[in-house]
């Protein structure tokens, strides 16, 4: 079973994969243009009061909580997210 | 005869575009505005092998859609000005994303030279990029550069010149497949029937943009014969579906290209995150930020002091020389009391301003600014803005005008409006002379802390105002925040000095024009009518001051301060310049002792005046930019009235408290 949840709720510090962006198409395309393409691996680097610092395709991005709620992620193949 | 070549430099943000531009043009740069919009435009020229290259730095963009004002500027320049060569600067360590912009530049039919920058970093990582293959696959020229070391710049110049001599490029086509292609074909046919239009804009490019639902592209058809036809065609389509599909295809194209060009390119990097762990730490982030800011101002003063003493001595000598050598009384007064005293009191602060700009440039180029935005995101969010708004606000420490322009990177209209309205509360460099004079005079030992406090007050007022505006005016949520964090780099001394000079030069020009004009006007008003003592209550300026004195009398300000504040609207440094002129003492030490000697000028009044200067209506330049960028008189007047009201109230509170405490 796959568990697809917003990045904001994904256990911090664990690697995951972008599977969808829950937003208008404009924003969806914008994220692609910035290099956050579907299927990209997200490597979380840190979290600061609800904002996230992530590494995607070799580039670091700062994401606000709102944005992290729109990005739907799933565990990388073979890994099971550890909640708690 | 030397041949002129028009060159535009494009690229993603954070790829070293500015460094390349600086390396290409050297120090000969001109900073101005793009026509129609107030986005900073940098131009430079370079002579290379009998050719004169006229180089324009386009704003850094991820793509050439019309998503933000930046992108429209970059795109329109390429479309309308048709540069002979476009240089795209790429980050060699992140080719996939950078090639996305390349694909769009190719679609526009540009004559493209790729500068694969940061090649040193890619090489250390073990990447082996086959640029010959890249060239042949894309039909472009490509050069490896490492601009921070000056590597590849000459080859790049050669390549630009060679490019103009080679055949014009074949417009590059990405196959979008199936129904997308069908629609592109149909649109191209309609567009092709308008000769004028298809001469100006590549038909295929236009068709692609129209299909993506690009409003800006559509507006370019507004005066053409086929507008109706196109609109009819488009009304049956759902752009949203196409947008993402087409972006997908572009990445697909890049995906097939990359493995042929770069066989060993690392999929991922694991940079050292220690620095970020500390700097963006939940508890340490904000204290570190504040410490850096405080350090920045301390540094500004420490380094500037010896230079200020030199300038002070020079103007003291000049004023004495003028008064003792010129016999005509009025001329001696105009030059001595007016121009030397007024301009001198402002020029005195040039070292501070230059150092401040230098430090801001250092922070920007090191990559810290983006981290500051990240740290502040949460706080900004609770106040109704997003982290990205913090960058224009930080730029506001230098000057409100470019800061308000910098809001163009905010895509959401409401976010942008609120940021523009609150940015002037960030204390700009022009207000610094006022603080230095008053804090230095009345709070000598704690001057640094008083000034730091004023900067913090500015930030607080900006944040609280943002909350108010979000609650009552531009209701809604701030748009989701996402921003690329550039890797930390050792700031380039050369680039920072260049930035300092560009900004500082604008300041000097302001002193030479607006401020000289302002102080001459004040002198005229202070000198006439004949018979009245210079700068006294009987002079014209005295009458004017008396007229407006009641407005600020509740604060305890006298007419001299009232006049200084009125003229401060022209440029805030004039608050100091006009005090210098009105007290007839010139700048520096003499003015300080005159202020201390004035019984009406207590430390509490000085503090109140600093608070008032910080917060009241921004200078005429900033107000004009607000009008231009919001496109509305309403917001301009609103900002002016709101800020002046806030200034009045907070100055009153400050003076009230000050009278008790001090």
Image (cartoon, rainbow, N blue to C red):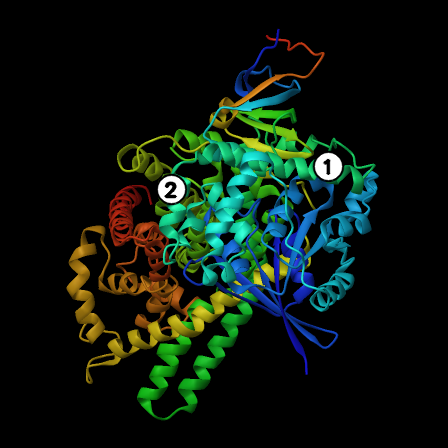
Near-viewer residue (B189 or B48): B189
Asked if one can make out residue B14 in the rendered structure from this viewpoint, the answer is no
**Vertical arrangement, residue B416 with respect to residue B539, above or below:** above
Location of residue B401 in the rendering, given as x and y in whole percent from the top left corner: 42, 56
> Which quarter of the rendering shows the N terminus of chain B?
bottom right
Q: Secondary structure at mark 2?
A: helix
Location of residue A55 in the rendering, given as x and y in whole percent from the top left corner: 65, 30
Tell me the residue at 46%/33% (across/down): B240
Location of residue B475 in the rendering, given as x and y in whole percent from the top left corner: 30, 33
**Vertical arrangement, residue B366 with respect to residue B502, above or below:** above
Decide if residue B319 is on the left or right side of residue B128: left
Mark 2 is surrounded, within 10 Å at the Cα level, by few (under 14), some (14 to 19) or many (20 or more) other residues, namely some
Tell me the residue at 30%/65% (across/down): B567
Residue B256 is labelled as: 1
What is the chain identity of the residue bearing mark 1? Answer: B
Residue B413 is labelled as: 2
Mark before the other along the chain sequence, 2 or 1: 1
Asked if one can make out residue A41 in the rendered structure from this viewpoint, the answer is yes
């Amino acid at each position: 079973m796959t568990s697809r949840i917003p990045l904001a709720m994904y256990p911090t510090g664990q690697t995951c994969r972008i599977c969808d962006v829950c937003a208008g198409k404009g924003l969806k395309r914008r994220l692609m243009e910035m290099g956050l393409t579907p299927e990209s691996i997200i490597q979380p680097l840190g979290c600061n009061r609800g904002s996230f610092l992530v590494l995607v395709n070799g580039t670091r991005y700062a994401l606000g909580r709102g944005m992290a709620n729109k990005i739907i992620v799933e565990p990388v193949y073979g890994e099971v997210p550890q909640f708690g | 005869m030397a041949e002129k070549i028009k060159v535009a430099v494009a690229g993603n943000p954070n790829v070293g575009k500015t460094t390349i531009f600086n390396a290409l043009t050297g120090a000969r740069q001109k900073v101005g505005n793009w026509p129609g919009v107030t986005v900073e435009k940098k131009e430079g020229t370079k002579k290379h092998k009998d050719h004169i290259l006229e180089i324009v730095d386009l704003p850094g963009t991820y793509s050439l859609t019309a998503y933000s004002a930046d992108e429209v500027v970059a795109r329109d320049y390429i479309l309308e000005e048709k540069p002979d060569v476009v240089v795209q600067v790429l980050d060699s360590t992140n080719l996939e994303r950078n090639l996305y912009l390349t694909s769009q530049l190719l679609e526009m039919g540009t004559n493209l030279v790729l500068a694969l920058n940061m090649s040193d970093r890619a090489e250390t990582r073990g990447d082996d990029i086959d640029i010959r293959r890249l060239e042949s696959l894309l039909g472009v020229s490509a050069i490896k550069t490492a601009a921070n070391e000056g590597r590849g710049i000459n080859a790049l110049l050669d390549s630009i010149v060679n490019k103009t001599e080679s055949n014009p490029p074949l417009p590059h086509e990405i196959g979008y497949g199936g129904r997308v292609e069908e629609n592109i074909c149909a649109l191209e046919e309609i567009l092709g029937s308008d000769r004028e239009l298809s001469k100006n804009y590549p038909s295929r490019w236009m068709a692609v943009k129209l299909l993506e639902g690009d409003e800006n592209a559509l507006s370019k058809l507004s005066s053409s014969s086929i507008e109706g036809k196109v609109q009819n065609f488009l009304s049956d389509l759902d752009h949203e579906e196409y947008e993402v599909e087409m972006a997908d295809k572009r990445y697909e194209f890049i995906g097939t290209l990359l493995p042929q060009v770069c066989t060993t390119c690392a999929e991922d990097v694991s940079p050292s995150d220690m620095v970020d762990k500390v700097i963006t730490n939940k508890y340490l982030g904000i204290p570190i930020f504040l410490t850096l800011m405080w350090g920045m101002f301390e540094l500004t003063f420490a380094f500037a002091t010896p230079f200020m003493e030199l300038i002070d001595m020079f103007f003291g000598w000049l004023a004495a020389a003028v008064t003792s050598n010129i016999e005509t009384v009025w001329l001696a007064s105009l030059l001595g009391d007016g121009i030397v005293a007024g301009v001198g009191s402002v020029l005195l602060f040039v070292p501070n301003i230059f150092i401040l700009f230098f430090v801001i440039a250092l922070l920007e180029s090191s990559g810290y600014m983006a981290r500051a935005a990240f740290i502040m995101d949460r706080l900004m969010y609770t106040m109704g803005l997003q982290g990205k708004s913090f960058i224009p606000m930080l730029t506001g420490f230098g000057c409100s005008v470019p800061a308000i322009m910098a809001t163009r990177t905010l895509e959401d209209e409401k976010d942008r409006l609120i940021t523009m309205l609150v940015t002037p509360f960030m204390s700009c460099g022009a207000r610094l002379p006022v603080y230095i004079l008053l804090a230095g005079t009345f709070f000598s030992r704690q001057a640094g802390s008083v000034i730091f406090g004023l900067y913090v007050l500015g930030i607080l007022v900006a944040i609280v105002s943002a909350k108010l505006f979000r609650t009552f005016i531009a209701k809604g949520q701030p748009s989701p925040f996402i921003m690329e964090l550039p890797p930390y780099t050792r700031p380039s001394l050369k680039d920072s000095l260049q930035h300092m000079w560009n900004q500082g030069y604008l300041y000097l020009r302001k002193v030479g024009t607006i401020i000289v004009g302002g102080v001459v006007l004040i002198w005229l008003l202070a000198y006439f009518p004949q018979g009245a003592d210079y700068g006294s209550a009987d002079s014209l300026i005295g009458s004017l001051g008396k007229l407006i004195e009641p407005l600020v009398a509740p604060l305890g300000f006298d007419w001299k301060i009232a006049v200084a504040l009125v003229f401060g609207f022209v440029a805030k440094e004039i608050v100091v310049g006009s005090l210098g002129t009105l007290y007839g003492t010139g700048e520096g030490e003499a003015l300080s002792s005159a202020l201390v000697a004035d019984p009406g000028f207590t430390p509490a009044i000085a503090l109140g005046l600093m608070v008032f200067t910080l917060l009241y209506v921004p200078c005429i330049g900033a107000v004009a930019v607000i009008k231009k960028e919001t496109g509305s008189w309403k917001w301009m007047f609103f900002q002016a009235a709101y800020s002046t009201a806030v200034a009045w109230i907070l100055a009153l509170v400050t003076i009230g408290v000050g009278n008790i405490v001090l």
